Image (spheres, coloured by chain):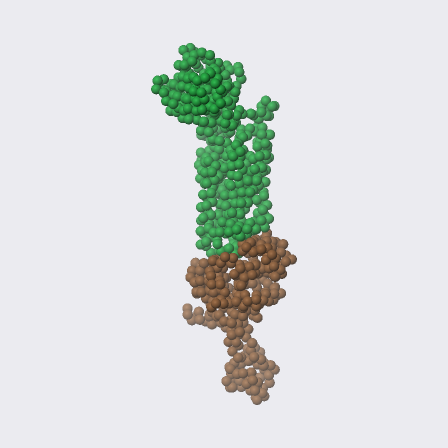
Chain colours: A brown, B green
Amino acid sequence: MNDTIISVDGLRKRFRRTVALDGMTFTVRPGQVTGFVGPNGAGKTTTMRVILGLDAPDAGTALVGGRPYRSLHHPLCHVGSLLDAGALQPGRTARNHLLWLAHSQGLPARRVDRVLEDAGLTSVARRRAGGFSLGMRQRLGIAAAMLGDPPAIMLDEPFNGMDPEGIIWMRGFLKALASQGRAVLVSSHLMGELQDTADHVVVVGRGRVIADASVARLLAATANGRVVLRTESAAAAVVLTDAGGTVTATGPGVLTVAGLTAETVVALMNSNALPFSEISAHRATLEEAYLELTREAVEFKAVSQ
Amino acid sequence: MRALIHSEWTKFRTVRGWVIGMAVAGFVILGFGLLPSFQGSCGGRGPQSDCVLPVGPEGQAVTDGFMFVHQPLTGDFSLTVRVASITGVLPPGPGQDEMREGVAPWTKAGLLIKDGTTQGSAYAAVMLTGGHGVRMQHNFVHDTAGMAGSVNSPRWLRLTRTQQKITGEESADGTAWTTVGTVTLAGLPSTAQVGLFVASPQYAEVDDESSFGSFSSYGGFTIATALFDNLSRAEGWQGKRIGGPDNMDDELGSFEETGDGSVRVTGSGDIAPAVGGPAGIGTGLTDTLVGTFAGLIFIVVIAAMFVTAEYRRGLIRTTLAASPGRGKVLAAKATVMAAVSFVVGTVAAAIVVTLGQEVLRGNGVYVHPASFATELRIIAGTGLLLAVAAALSVGLGALLRRGTTAVAAVIVTVVLPYLLAIAVLPPAAGDWLLRVAPAAAFALQQSLIEYPQVLNLYIPQAGYFPLPPWAGLAVLAGWAAAVLGLAAHLLRRRDA
């Protein structure tokens, strides 16, 4: 596909006896935030390091704009990345940290001042990075990733260590990048962090992709037309089951009904004179979708082993 | 590559500790060189005791003190003599009190023509030596070997002047003659002083009993007596101790004509280039640069940490993601460290060589002057020594990745061999070490010249290195190239 910016195809990598990547395959497209989700040890960081040419895969390819990363002339102008916010020389100021990076790409110092401003670091630009909080280091790492004004951004666990305010800033920042037409790949071990941020998710476990879908489709599939009903009536479950619904008690006085539309449920309750206080279409969370997907993956593993 | 070097330079200059460390390296070199380190006796006992060495016709400081039995001869001539024997005394050996019988290897007895009896004037001579056979020498620094010989087997010598050409010949029997050499003494006046001479130089030897960790040498003046006969010119001889008092009849210089053209000449001293060190006088410019070693320690540690600090912080991944050409990254790091070290070393050496020799002289130490070219080589060589050592350390840092390991490695490979050679090992072992270890490049700092025709202890402790300057640099450069090459290879192959 022409609009693919990062493509990862069949990556395999083994560290001694541990299989880190086991056929990792996915693509990252421009104009959207792609969440890269999986438990710790699923191979997210290794994949990103392979994309950046830092680790060599045993098999498979990783391309950026159709080319291997190591062949890029000024790579920071193609992909900006933040793998480890702590990777700083403590005695060097924030501005000087960005300055050497800029010089390595042939970029002028004004580009440094620009990204410092965008990351909200202008006031601490001349302070030593060694004294920065983790949140400030994350911002500095983001600034470094933006230095080359790249069409693709890759961030490894950017929400780690951020305060709520920082998380909100980060979400807005990532969405803004995507709306500028950039490809954004963000890894996280917590699906919830990507709620309302990611447009697309690549769910990984044990070095391979479990699911690769748009967030909208994933949520719809998980919700599957279910209805949440709040009622104290014990007969409600029987009536709804008789009408062909699948009823699960999901809390005290809360029933989740599958297989019936909300209108049908309301009609059945009314015609049987059963009281209820609330009825709503079930809204699936990304977390649920993720748990469902990974549960299947774990079951699949259990069967196959 | 320019962008990379710019980037690495920015990295260096933005960490205050590294910049300060490099500056300290420079100041250490200055400090050791400019603070009075040792005392000499020149000028210490009034103006009469000033150390002023005669200067030879080719500009070097020379030793010109020997027994000369001479007469003025005008125009061309030929003078023949037989050296019947040479005997002499050497300084006491270790633990002894008495002078011992013996002839020093560079004791000289033979025929000499000299432009007057002033010290340092031009000369040419053919001679039998104590241990180096027959030689033809002129103007202090030139030496041509004739046949092997012994102080106990008589040898005929002949010196012939044809205008400004002087020819020396030798013969075992006085009939079959072999030319040892012909030299031209430009500007030799038509009347020159010609005659017999005996010189017996300072003697020095490393004490074989030297214990590990301290080397000792012993030595002192020597005296030789040569028996000449069959002298082709019988009359008109007068004795003069060149460079000595005019009242010449003492054990260090005398002569006695015994008839039939036989003359017994006793002499001491030498007619040769002046040397520094145990058998010579004073020291060389190298001694102003004693601080280089301490400066080197700072520089190699900083250069190694310039790389290992990135591994420690994980910053190496940022660097390699920004610049995937890993060999070039390493080259840029080595270039920046080498350039900074070169500037530090060259500037410090320029100051210390210029001012330090005044400090030494002010302290009564005789400092052998060096030619401008030698001074330049010593100054730029100090920069080069530090620069290539820094590049080597960058390579070791990249190879070993851990700061403590890398610093230990640079100390062991760069610093330790020099220390062992100078201060711990016996001279022979130290000599060997300074041929193979990176510290061989200290030869760039040698200012004294090693003359094969002057017996001396040409050992590192005295400022004489076993390799020529550029060969020493080549040894260090070879180490740096090998380590950087291996480091680049592994850097490309390993995951970052």
Looking at this view, is A15 or B322 the one in front? B322
Residue B66 rendering spot, x and y as whole percentages? 48, 20
Q: Is residue B69 above or below residue A32?
A: above
Q: Is residue A248 visible?
A: no
Give me the residue at 48% from left, 37% from top: B469
Residue B166 vertical placement versus A192 (above, below): above
Query: Which of the pair A231/B203 is nearer the observer?
Result: B203
Which of the 4 image quarters holds residue A228?
A: bottom right
| Residue beneath the point at 49% across and 58% down | A72
Residue found at the very far bottom of the displayed protein: A271
At a point 51% along the width and 55% down the height, the residue shown is: B323
Q: Measured from the top left, where is residue B493 in percent x and y?
A: 44, 54
Is residue A193 positioned above or below B79 on the image?
below
Residue B431, located in which quarter of the rendered image?
A: top left
The reply to whether residue B112 is visible in this rendering is yes
Q: Residue furthest right?
A: A123
Quadrant (top left, top right, bottom left, bottom right) of the C terminus of chain A: bottom left
Q: What percent of the width, then of the height, locates residue B331?
A: 49, 49
Residue A23 position in % (x across, y down): 43, 65
Total labels: the figure holds: 0
The residue shown at (53%, 66%) is A183
